[in-house]
Amino acid sequence: MSSYLTCNKWGIIVKNVIDLITRVPKEMKEEFSRNVCQENSFRFVMISLILMISESILLVFFRGSIFNTCPLVISFIIFNILYFPLIWKTYRNQEKYHKYFVRCVQFIYIVAVMLFGCALSILPQNQFASINPYIMAVFGLSVFVYTPPVVSSILFFSVYFVFFLALPYYQPNPQAVEILRINALIMNILGWIMSRMVYRMKIMSFTDKKTIEEINLELKDLVMRDSMTLLLNHENIFLRLTDEIERAKRIHYPLSLIMIDIDHFKEINDRFGHQAGDDVIIKVAQILNSTCRTTDVIGRYGGDEFLIIMPDTKSEDAVVLAERIRNTIEKTNFIKGIEVTVSGGITEFLQESSEELISSVDAKLYRAKENGRNRFEYENRTDL
C-alpha cells in the first residue's frame, strides 16, 4: 500500500512538472510556435547588431585590456558579420522557410553566443578569476530569448559542461577552479529558472491575448446575430447580400434569394401567446438551418420574415430548396399543436442592386400571400 502511495505521489509530481513545461493549449501550439520564432528572430537581429558594435568598440578602444582574447573577439565579429544575413532573412521571410530551419538558425546562434561568453571567461583566467562574460551570456539569453524549458536546460548545462572541463586548463589555482565551477553552476540554475519564468509569462500573455480575441470574435458574432434565433440579423443579412451581389458580378455566377414569411403569425400570437409565437420562430429558424446548404446564408429579416441567400444557385434550384422547407415546416409538430405554414418569394439576381433584389423577392412573397398562402412564387410565376 505504501509503495502504491509513493508511486502515486511521484506520478503526481511528474505530471505537475510536465504540466509546467507544456502549458500551451494544443490548438494554439502551432500559432504560438510561429509567434515565438518571429519574436526571437527580431531579437536575434538586435542582439547580433549590438554584439557586433560593442565588440568592435571593445576591439578598437580597449585592445590592450583584451590582448589575450583579441583573436576570439575578432573571430566572433566575423562570425556575426557572416551569420547576420541568415538571421535577417529568416526574420524578414520567415513564412518562406520551414519552421525547423528557422529554429535551427536560432539555436546555432544561441550556442555561438553562449560559447563565446564561456570562452571569453576562460581564456583570461591566468590574469584574473572572473566569469562575468559567461554569466552575462547566460542571463542575457534567459531574459531576451524565448526558449522552451527542455531546450534551455540542455543548452545551458551542455555549455556549462564545456566550461567545467575547460576551466582547469586556463585557471592554475585549484581552489579558484572549484569556486568558479560552483558559481557558474548556480548562475546557470538561476538563468534556467529565469528563462522558464520568461517563457511561462510569454505563454500566459499569448493565451490571454488569444482568449480575448476569441471573446471579441464571439461578441462580434453576437452583435451580428439575432438574439432569439442566432441567425444573422436584419442589418447583417443585408450586408451579406450586398457582398454576395458584388461577388456574383465579379465571378459571373448565378445568385438566388428566398424570402419566407410565417402564415397567420399574428393569429398565433393572439391565440397562443407571444411565448408560443417566439417558440415557433425559433423552431422555423432551426428547420432553415438544418435544411439549407452550408453555402447558403440565412438571416432573420423581420419579425416573422426570413431571408436565404443562395450563392452560385439558379432560381430553379432555389425552388427545390424552398419546396423542401415548406413541406418540412408543414409536417413539423410545433408546440401546443400549432399548425404552421409558410409563404415566400424566390428571385434570381439579374444585375439589380440589393434594394431592388429585396423589392423583387418581397413582391413575390406578398403575391404568394394573396394567392392562398402555404406556397412560393418565383420568376416565371409558376405556383408550387
Image (cartoon, rainbow, N blue to C red):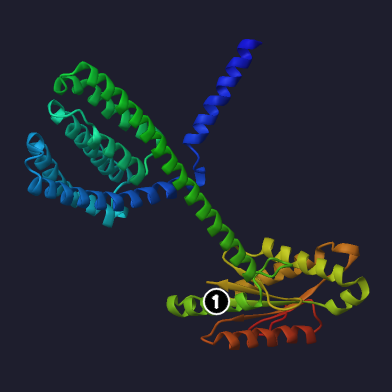
From the viewer's side, name the closer residue of 121 and 240: 121
Q: Nearer the viewer, residue 85 or 244?
A: 85
Q: Position of residue 324 (x, y in %)?
A: 71, 67
Circle 1: residue type: Leu
At label 1, counting other C-alpha atoms closer than 10 Å, the crowd grade (few under 14, some 14-19, many 20 or more) is: many
Q: 102 above or below 160?
A: below
Residue ID at (76%, 64%): 328
Q: Residue at x 72, y 80 (%)?
A: 383
What residue is shown at x 14% (from left), y 30% (from top)? 124
Q: Residue 129: image x %, image y %?
A: 20, 28
Image-quadrant location for residue 107: top left
Looking at the image, is 142 positioned above or below residue 356?
A: above
The quadrant in which the N terminus is found is: top right
42 sits left or right of 211 in the view: left
Quarter containing the C terminus: bottom right
Residue 366 x %, y %: 74, 86
The one of 222 and 296 positioned closer to us in this rendering: 222
Q: Secondary structure at mark 1?
A: strand
In this rendering, the answer to whether 365 lies above or below 72 is below
Q: Is residue 264 visible?
A: no
On the image, the x and y values in percent for residue 335 come to 87, 63
Relative to residue 163, is residue 59 drawn left or right? Answer: left
Residue on which disc 1 sits: 255
Residue 9 sits in which quadrant?
top right
Image quadrant in which you'd find residue 326: bottom right
Name the side, left or right, on which 6 lies relative to 121: right
